[in-house]
Amino acid sequence: MNPPAADPLSAGLLERLPLLARDALTSGLPEPWRWVSNSLLAILAIIVVFSSLFALLTLAERKVLARVQNRPGPNRAGLPLTRFRLGGLGQPLADGIKMLTKEDIVPRGADPVLHFLAPVVLLALSLLTFAVLPYGRLLVPVELEAGVLYFFAAGAATELALFMAGWASRNKYSLLAAMRALAQLISYELPLLLAVVPVVLLAGSLSTSGIVAAQAGWDLGFLPRWFVLTPWGFASFLIFLTAALAESNRSPFDLPEAESELIAGHLTEYSGFKYALFFMAEYLGMTALAGLGVTLFLGGWREPLPFLEFVPSYAWFGLKLLALLFVFIWIRATFPRLRIDQLTRLAWKFLVPLALLNLGTAALWALTAGWGPALQPLRWLGATALVAGPFVLLGRGLTAGLRPRTYRFA
Amino acid sequence: MNPAAPPSRAGASVRAVQDPFHGDLLEVSMGPHHPSTHGVFRMIATLDGERIVRLKPVFGYLHRNHEKLGESTSYLASMPYTDRLDYLNSMTNNWAYALAVEKLAGQAVPERAEHVRILLAELTRLLNHTCLAGFLLQDTGCSGTPLMYAFREREAILDLFEALSGSRMMCNFQRFGGCRVDPSPAWMEAVSALVGRYDRFLDEYEELITGNEILLARTQGVGVLPAALAINAGITGPMLRASGVNHDLRRVDGYGLYPRFPFRIPLGDHGDTYDRYMVRMLEMRESLGILRAVLRDLPGGPIIDPKAKLRGFRPKPGEAYGRIEGPKGEIGFYLVSDGGPNPYRYRVRPPSLINLTVLEDLCLGHTVADAVIILGSIDIVLGEVDR
Amino acid sequence: MLGTGLLHGLKVTARNLVGSFHDPARMVTTQYPEERTRLPENYRNFPFLLGDDPADPLGTLRCVACQICEKECPPQCIYIVMERDEKGKAQKRPKVFDIDLSVCMSCQICVEVCPFDAIKMDQEFEIATADRFTGLLRHKEDLARSNAYYHQLHPTEAAAVDAALAEQKARQAAAKAAKAPAPAAAPLATPAVPPTPLPPAAPAP
C-alpha cells in the first residue's frame, strides 16, 4: 500500500488499526520483501473481506427479498452439525458446499476452453476493480493517478466474459443472452462514464482518493460537501445508479439472465462451482460499482456529520456501501424487467443526453464557484432547473403514449 | 448462428434466409421445460434477432384422455375429474359440468345452492385473476414480489375452499341438483371478512405495479388482439372483453341467479396485454360487489334438491350443453345420453385451449420477452388445454 | 412524470418490508414441521373403513362388500372380494378390501355412495413412503378404524351419521314390531349421508 495523502500519525488508533496489524506482521522482513508482503496482505485482505461480504450479501439479498415478499426467507441452515439455526446464517456455507459437490457439466458441443475460462476471467476482472477504491482514510490498496479510468477499464471487460460464457455454451438461450449482454455493455458503458465525468471535472482529479479529498468540508457547519448533495451531482448519481444496475446485470436490467425468458441466459449450461464463480463475480462486480458510487458521490469514507469523526473512516465506507447495496436489492424486489429495445432506448435517448446536459450543468457549477453568498440561491435554482427540466422533457418523450388507462363499463 | 459447426438436430435446425444481408433465423424451442410456459407447453419460435417471425405452439404433453374417461365412467364419477381440467378453478368447472347434467336430466336446483354456487364462482374468479396477475408480473421479471402477494391472498381463498369442501384445489363440490356441503354461518363470516379486506389488497397491488412505467412499456401495445380476430377465433372471457367485445355469459345467458345481482363488465379499448391485465383487475372489483350482494341475500333452505339421485343416476336419452362464464372464458360441457349410467358422448369446451389458438397472431413481430408475457396474459392452464 | 410509478412501487415494497416484521396479516408463513395449522373439520384425503367396536374395529367392519364404492370410484383404486364360507355362501363382509392410495384422488365419492356409512375420509396426510409399489397399498387391516376415531376427526358429521343410523335402526325395529310385509327397502332409498351435514369446524384464518 502506498502511503495515502493524509498524515497517518494524525489519525486515531482505531483508524490506524489495520495498518498497525499489517506492520506487526511484516516488520521483521527486510525492506524489499516487506513491500511485496504488504501488497500481498492487502490483496488477501480484499479477497477475504469481499468474499465474506459476498457470502453474507447472498443471504442478505434473499432475506430482504423474502421480507419484502412477506416470507421469512432461508432460516434453516445454521451451525453445521448442531441444532443452532442462527436465523439461517449458515445458508451461504450450505450453498457453497452444495455448489462444490455438484457435478460440473460441460455440454458436448461446447467450447471447453472458453466454457472454463469465462467464469475465471469474470471473477478475475471483478476482483481487479477493488484495487483502486479508497476504503478508509489510510486504506487505499493502489494509489493510481488515473484510478477512475483503471476502474472502468477493468470493469468494462466483465461483459466480455459474459459473452464468452454465452458463446461457448453452445446453447441458443445462452447465445441470445450473450447478444443481449453485448448490447447492454455498449449502451450502458457510455452513460456510466458520462455520469462520472462531471465528478472528475469538479474534483479536478482522476484519482479516487483525490475525488474523496475534493468532497471534504462542511456547508453551514453540518452539511457535508458530498457531490450527491448538489443538483448536478444528484442527477449524475441517479444516472450512475441506473447504469451501474445495468452494468452489473441487476434487475430491472437483468436481461442476460432473464429467467422467465432465457431460462438462465448465459448461465444455462453452467453448474456446480463454475456457476458459483459466476454468482460470486456478479456480486463482486455489483459491490465494486457500489463502492465506486460511494467514493464518487457519497463522500467515500467521510463521516456524514462533523461530530461523528471519531468513528473510523472504513466503517463509514462500509456502512455507505451496505446502504447502497440495500438500495440495489430493494430495486430488484420491486421492478419488472425491461425489454432489450427499451433498455437500449433508455440508454441512448434518455441517459446519454441527460448525462451530456448534466456535464454542462456541472461546468456551469464549476464556473460559478466564486459567486458570493448572495448569489448562491440563484446558482442552486439555475442548476436545479437545468437538471430537472431536461429530465421532465426527456422523460415525457421516453414514455410518450404510455399511461395508466381508464376503462369503460358495460 | 451457432458457434461450432452444427450437427443437425431434429426440431432445432437453423435455417438460412434468402436475403444475404439479413442473416440467419434462429429456431428456439421454448418448452416443454421452460420457466414461463405455465406447464408443459412448447413454443417453437423462429427468431430474427429477437423478433419472432414464426411461432408454432405444441401442446398435448399433459393429455389424460379426459373426455374418453368421461364416457366410460358414471356421470358422478366425472365430477372429480373436472376439478383437474383447469386446476385453479375447480369450483367453476364443477358448476359447468353440473349445469350440463342438470339440463340433461331436468334437475332443479334449490335457491340456496344457486347462491352458494355464485359465491364460489366469484371467489374462484378472484382466485384465478389474482393468480394471473401474479404470474403475469412474474413473467415480466419481477423477482417474485407481486406473485408472492397474489399467492398470499390466494391462500386465504384456498383455506376457505378447504374448510368448505375438504380440499384446497380439487374441491369436487357441486352435485347434480345442488352442492355437496351446506356452508355454516362461521364459514360465511370468514367469506365476508375476506371480501371486506380484498379491496385493500387490490389497492396495494395496483399501487405496487399498475402505474409502473416499466410495466406500461412492457405491456401497452404488446400483443394486440383486434376485436374481429377475437370473435372469429372464438375467444371468450376477459381476453375477449379486453378487445372491447361486450360478451359475458353471466349477462348473455343469465344462468343461475346472476340476473338478480347487478354488476358491470369492464371493457378494454386496445386489446393489448395491458388491457387484458387491467380488465381482470377491474373484474375482481366487480366480483367483490357480487359477493357482497350474495352474502347479503343468502336464503335458507336445502343445499341440494332432496329428490336428486346420487346412485343409479340415469338421465333420459337426449343431449345438453351447459356453459358458464368461467374465469378464463366460456367453459362448457356437451353431453349426450343414451339412457345409460355413462354419457354416450362427453365433450369439454376448454377456454384455455381456444384462447390459445391466437398465440401466433399475437406474438408475430414481437420479441421473445413479449411472447412470454403474451402467453401469460392469455391465461392458460395446461390441464385444460390438453385435457 | 417519469418515475412516479416506480416510486409508488418502492413505497409499497418498503411498507411490506417493514410490515413483515410486525404485521401478522402480512407474514402468513407457517413453519411446517414445527408449527402446524389446524386442519378444518371437513378436510379429507384418503378413505378408511369404520368398525363399530372400538376394541376390534377390524372384526366389526360395517362394510358388507356390496362393491358399490368399487364401481363408483373414478380412478378405480378400490378392490373388494367378498368373504364366502365353505359352501360358497356370501358372508356380507369383505375378505379383501384394498385401497391403493397412490391411485386414490381423494374425491370422497366412495363415502357419498356408501349406503352403510362404512367408509369415511381420513385426515392423515404424512404417508410418504420409499416403496412405490406396495408402500401405499392399504389392506383392510390397515384401513380399519373405530367410530371413536371418526368422531375425533369429523365430530359434526359423525354425530349426524350416528343420529341417522340410530333413527334408521329405530324405524327398522318399529317396522319389525308392526310386522309389516315389506320394511327393508326404506333405508336404501334415503341418502345415507344426510343432506344437511357439516358446518366446518375451523373457519379459515
Image (spheres, coloured by chain):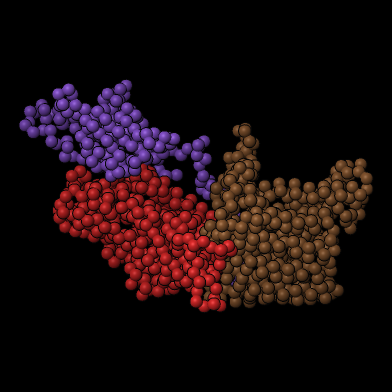
Q: Pick out the residue farthest to the left.
A: C181
Q: Is residue C49 left or right of residue A18?
A: left
Residue A97 rendering spot, x and y as whole percentages: 63, 42
Give the colour in which the image draws chain C. Answer: purple
Give the colour in which the image draws chain A. Answer: brown
Residue at 28% of width from left, 37% of height from top? C78
Q: Is residue A198 left or right of residue A32?
A: left
In the displayed structure, would residue C181 be above or below residue B386? above
Residue at 36% of width from left, 39% of height from top? C102
Give the colour in which the image draws chain B. Answer: red
Residue A287 rendering spot, x and y as whole percentages: 70, 55
Residue B116 visible to an observer of this rendering: no
Residue C103 visible to an observer of this rendering: yes
In the displayed structure, would residue B120 be above or below residue C104? below
Residue at 79% of width from left, 56% of height from top? A131
Specify the quadrant of the image occupied by residue A209.
Answer: bottom right
Q: Quadrant of the C terminus of chain B?
A: bottom left
Depth check, front residue: B350 or A222: B350
Residue at 33% of width from left, 72% of height from top? B232
In the displayed structure, would residue B261 be above or below residue C39? below
Q: Is residue C205 left or right of residue A69?
A: left
Specify the quadrant of the image occupied by residue B187.
Answer: top left
Residue A165 rendering spot, x and y as whole percentages: 62, 58
Depth check, front residue: C97 or A195: C97
Residue A56 rendering spot, x and y as whole percentages: 67, 47
Q: Quadrant of the N terminus of chain B?
A: bottom right
